[in-house]
Every structure is written in C-alpha cells, then in structure tokens.
Image (tube, rainbow, N blue to C red):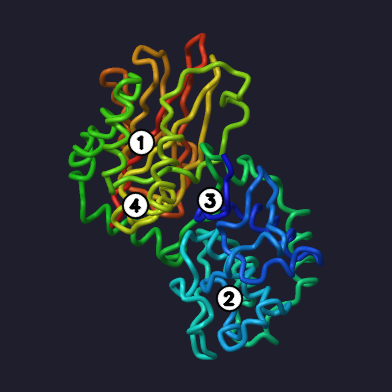
Amino acid sequence: MKVMLHDIAGYLTEHAAWQWLETCTRPDVLPRLAGLSPDQVEVRRSDFVLPTQAQQQPRSAAFLAPECAADAKLSCSAAACMWTLGALTFYALMGVDVLEGRGGATQTADTPVPRLGSTHASAELASLLHQCLHYDPAQRPDAEHVHRLAEAALKHRPQPAARISAPAGRSLATSLRELWPESMQPLLCLLLLCCLGGQLHAQQSQPTAEMQQLVQRCQALRQHQAKAKVTQQFNLDTKWTLMDEIAIDRKGECTVNDPVSTFGFNDMGFRIAKYHGGVTNMGGRFRNGQDRRYHYSLIEVTAKRGATIGYDITGREGAQQFAIVPYDANAPYDATLTLQGSPCAKATVKQGVCYLTMTQPVKPTDVLHLTIHNKGAQHKAFIIVNYNPWK
C-alpha cells in the first residue's frame, strides 16, 4: 500500500521535516513543487518521491502562493515554489491546511501567518516556515538558504527512534507544551494542591467509566471475531486519540524478527484515522496524547521476553491514570510510573490489567516515565491507555 504525504499529515517528525525540506530544495526538485498537493507525494520510509511535471494533477489552490491568484504562470517561480513548500510542510506537521485551506488567494500583506508552536516544531523550523509563507515573494528565503539550513539540521540532529511514517507505525514528537512561565509553575501547582486538598486522590482512585470501557474494548481485541465490532466502537467514539508521540524503546521492544501475538490496535487506529481523512467525525485531529481536545490516548507496544520497556510521557496536566492491558490475560508483568525518578502512582491489578493512578497532579512540562517489565519467557504485547484530565 502506498503511503502519501496526506496520510501522515499531523505525524511528521522534526527530523523528517528537515529531510523533506532538504529534498524539495534540490535544484532538480524545486520546480516540481508548483501547485503540488499532499496526495501527490509518496513517502517511502525515509524518502519523499515527487511526481514528474508530466505526472502532476491539476494544481491545488490550498498550496498556491498569493501572487498565483492573479497569474497562474507565476506558480512555477522559485518564490512561489517556496510558498508552496512552506504550506506543504505546515500541513504535514500540523495536519491542517494553512490559512484554512484557502491558500494564498485570500492572503494580503496584513494577513497574519500562523506560527507553529513548540509542540510541533523547533523555533528554528517554525521561523523558517513563517518566512516561506510571507506574502511578499521578495521576503521569502531562497532555496539555497533553506537547503543549507536543512543539511545543517540533519547533520547535527540525531536520527529519531521512529521512522517518519509507516502504515501501521508510530511517529515521534519531542517538544513540550508550555502554558505559563517556568517561574509560575511551582506557585500554580501549590495553589492547585491547596484547593483540592486530600480529595484529589480519592476522586481519581478509581478508573473512569470511559477508561473501563476502553479497557474492555482492548480485551475484546484478543478474540479475532470481535475485531469488527470493536473497530466500529472505536470508529464512533470521539473521546480518544492515538498516543503517537512516544519514542520506540529499541532495546526492549520486539522487532519484525521477534514472533509475538498482538492486538492489532495500531493498525486499526491508523485505518480509522485514514477513513476519516485524518480527522475524527467530530472535526478533531487524531494526533497524540498531548492534544488538549482528547482525554484518552492509546498505543500498542511490545516487550521482548524478560525485558523492561520504558517511555517518557510529556505534555500531560492534572492527575493522570494509566491502564496497561496485556495481550495474554495471565501474563506475568509489572508496571511503574515515576516522576523525577521517584514513584508517583499507585498500582492496582484487576483481571490482569494494571491500573496506575497518580498520587499527585502534573504540569505540562513534567516528564513522566512509564516502565513495563515483561517477566515472562515469551514476547508480549501491551496496550497503554492514558486518561489525561485537561483543565
């Protein structure tokens, strides 16, 4: 199955974005960006394949520079191609079209160009894309400048643990969301604790009804005959998203050479997102657990026999709940959650599912570390379910 750029919209990593910019600013590639749309770009592992000019379909208005509205011939100019490159990259990172999909046709010198936040891109990449989308062609960077920046970024940034795309894979996002200045965070946390008092843990000690429902669906996925029904349930549920931001644990996770039975949840989640054109039926993005529009996020991971797998989880707020659902109901394993190296959650096991309930609220800048120890003699799959009570 071909994977196109629009299939991974909203899932592009920082490293992949620089690689995409490096590819598109080559002299032989740049002219082919004229009016290109995301469904014309094929993603092959870590490569981007653009159609030849003869293969290109009709131009997409959402990715045409403002000057092209008056003169379509200008879409082939270097400056117009840079605007298209900025719009395509913005779409691939954010999952939404720049300027609400109207392209440059409605852009004026006074139109504010949206900036990428720290959750989606580094300040360097966000600034560069902002320049590419400038209304004035003369103010946009030239291809050689962007190419040099991309080469430098690729040289100094390590390869991410996850590939840039896979039909059933996961992507990596490393930046954190900051909602207030660092100096205010301890005060806000103290105020929150004072207001909630001892009721916080008591109120959150039991899994929510939605959490229990999600766990039951995951358990049902153990039976092949139930997959169609469960897929429909997840398809109609708009409260969850994929926990697609955590990095792969290359030391402990199974590889393609390790035989392991899985739920198939990641495949299912990708198909649901693609079925809805990358959006839920309520208009929200299937992005990751840092998206404030969703209270629940899920991902399936695997652990080699006897191995411990670990994940840094960021961008959460409030008293978190996690459920670890093993593929084998009787699998010997344990799970822990730590904050700054200290245990921060109470573990409760019910019907083979380990529930981790935070004993304290967290801030979006906190880094939680979740570990799962597979104590068995066989490779095992687990689904991680996270309840994130956004304020």
User: Quick one: 79 or 383, which is closer to the camera?
Assistant: 79
Q: Amino acid at mark 4?
A: Thr
Q: Position of residue 320 (x, y in %)?
A: 33, 43
Q: CA distance from mark 3 to mark 1?
A: 22 Å
- With 166 as the anchor, is 236 left or right in this view? left
Q: Position of residue 349 (x, y in %)?
A: 29, 21
For the question of whether residue 286 can be seen, the reply is: yes
Q: Amino acid at mark 3?
A: Ile
Give the residue at mark 3: 8
- With 24 as the anchor, is 188 left or right in this view? left
Q: Amino acid at mark 1?
A: Val
- The label number, if any, that marks residue 64 in the structure image: 2
Of helix, strand and loop, which one carries label 4? loop
User: Quick one: 156 or 329, which is closer to the camera?
Assistant: 329
Q: Can you tell which of label 2 and label 4 is closer to the viewer?
A: 2
Up the image or down, 179 lies above or below 2; here it is below
Q: Position of residue 29 (x, y in %)?
A: 76, 63
Q: Amino acid at mark 2?
A: Leu
Give the residue at mark 1: 385
- With 373 as the anchor, is 205 left or right in this view? left
User: Quick one: 253 or 176, which is closer to the camera?
Assistant: 253
Q: Residue at x 67, y 67 (%)?
A: 33
Local crowd at mark 4 within 10 Å, few (<14), some, or many (≥20)? many
Q: CA distance from mark 3 to mark 4?
A: 15 Å
Q: Position of residue 193 (x, y in %)?
A: 27, 52
Residue occupying the far front of the picture: 54
Instruction: Answer with mark 2 or mark 1, whichever residue precedes in sequence.
Output: 2
Q: Residue at x 41, y 32 (%)?
A: 265
Of helix, strand and loop, which one carries label 2? loop
- The label number, if any, that marks residue 280 in the structure image: 4
